[in-house]
Image: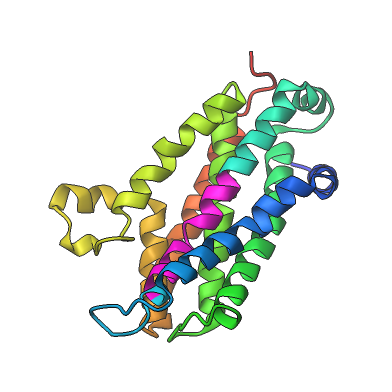
């Protein structure tokens, strides 16, 4: 891989994103609107277990889902569009290698993911008054990793899919099981054994576990989950590099 070619790919993608106002709004504004809607619904509803507003635990946990979902969709569709338009084939015909292409896209969308995750947490804590017992930086770290994971999974999906529709079809396969059994609605320890063991191979499970640690002010407990999330990100990028095709047909 060549650092100059990777940086050139990242710059080109960022310039394209800057010109696409709707995509920028979807990545940066839509998560804020969704969380605001959640606050509007549950901001005054007490949690039966703690008496605190139900928005606090629910909002913090769903923050782990929104960036992953949006970055998965946008990254996979945008990368597929490059392949179907022939841009990817022209890039691969140059001295650029598959690793340069995938990492260039990962770098560009990863920078957006960092902005998205940081903005979402700061908005939740300082505008919506989300109560977090642990340090805010810990929550920022986990949510940014979720956004980066969505980016990496989107790149892997775009490498495996042949059309934009196929990439979107992968979303329910990749994300919906995590929504149900990653610990958002029920503690994983309370699930049937089969579902618990399935949840151990889902990355969102470790994000929710880390968020629960932060909510309980156990910041020292997040590092195993953070390490596993980083491993999933690296694994998804490696899958994207090894499966990338020059053309969709």
- Above or below, comparing residue 112 to residue 105 in the picture: below
Q: Position of residue 170 (x, y in %)?
A: 47, 33
Q: Is residue 83 left or right of residue 43?
A: right
Q: Residue at x 53, y 37 (%)?
A: 239
Query: The C terminus is located in which quarter?
Result: top right
Residue 167 lies in quadrant? top right
Q: Is residue 216 left or right of residue 127?
A: left
Q: Nearer the viewer, residue 164 or 91?
A: 164
**Residue located 35% across and 67% down the image:** 209
Q: Position of residue 196 (x, y in %)?
A: 21, 54
Left or right position of 131 against 144? left
Residue 188: % across, % down: 24, 60
- Give me the residue at 48% from left, 71% from top: 39
Front-most of residues 38 and 179: 38
In magenta segment, residue 162: no
Vertical side of 249 occupied by 231: above or below: below
In the figure, 159 relative to 64: above or below? above
Examine the residues drawn in magenta and state their main secondary structure.
helix
Q: Residue furthest top?
A: 249
- Queried whether the magenta region covers residue 64, the answer comes back as yes
Residue segment shown in magenta: 57-72
Q: How is the image coloured?
A: rainbow
Can the viewer see residue 12? yes
Residue 224 appears in the picture as rendered: no
Where residue 246 appears, as percent x and y from the top left, is 69, 22
Q: Residue at x 62, y 29 (%)?
A: 244
The count of marks equals: 0
Q: Is residue 6 left or right of residue 103?
A: right
Residue 162: quarter of image: top right
Q: Name the image quarter holding the N terminus.
A: top right
């Amino acid at each position: 891989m060549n650092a100059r070619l990777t940086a050139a790919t990242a710059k080109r993608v960022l310039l394209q994103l800057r010109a696409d106002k709707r995509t920028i709004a979807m990545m940066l504004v839509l998560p804020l609107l969704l969380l605001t809607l959640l606050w509007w619904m549950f901001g005054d509803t007490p949690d039966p277990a703690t008496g605190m507003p139900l928005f606090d635990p629910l909002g913090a946990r769903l923050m782990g889902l929104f960036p992953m979902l949006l970055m998965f969709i946008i990254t996979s569709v945008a990368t597929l569009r490059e392949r179907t338009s022939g841009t990817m084939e022209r890039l691969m015909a140059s001295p650029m290698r598959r690793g340069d292409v995938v990492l260039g896209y990962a770098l560009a969308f990863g920078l957006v993911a960092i902005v998205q995750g940081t903005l979402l947490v700061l908005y939740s804590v300082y505008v919506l008054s989300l109560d977090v017992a642990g340090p805010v930086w810990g929550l920022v770290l986990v949510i940014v990793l979720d956004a980066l994971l969505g980016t990496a999974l989107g790149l892997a999906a775009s490498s495996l899919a042949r059309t934009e529709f196929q990439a979107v079809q992968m979303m329910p396969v990749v994300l919906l099981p995590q929504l149900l059994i990653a610990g958002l609605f029920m503690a994983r320890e309370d699930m049937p054994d089969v579902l618990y063991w399935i949840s151990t191979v889902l990355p969102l499970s470790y994000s929710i576990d880390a968020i629960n640690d932060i909510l309980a002010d156990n910041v020292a407990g997040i590092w195993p989950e953070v390490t596993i999330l980083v491993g999933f990100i690296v694994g998804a990028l490696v899958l994207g590099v090894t499966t990338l095709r020059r053309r969709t047909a």
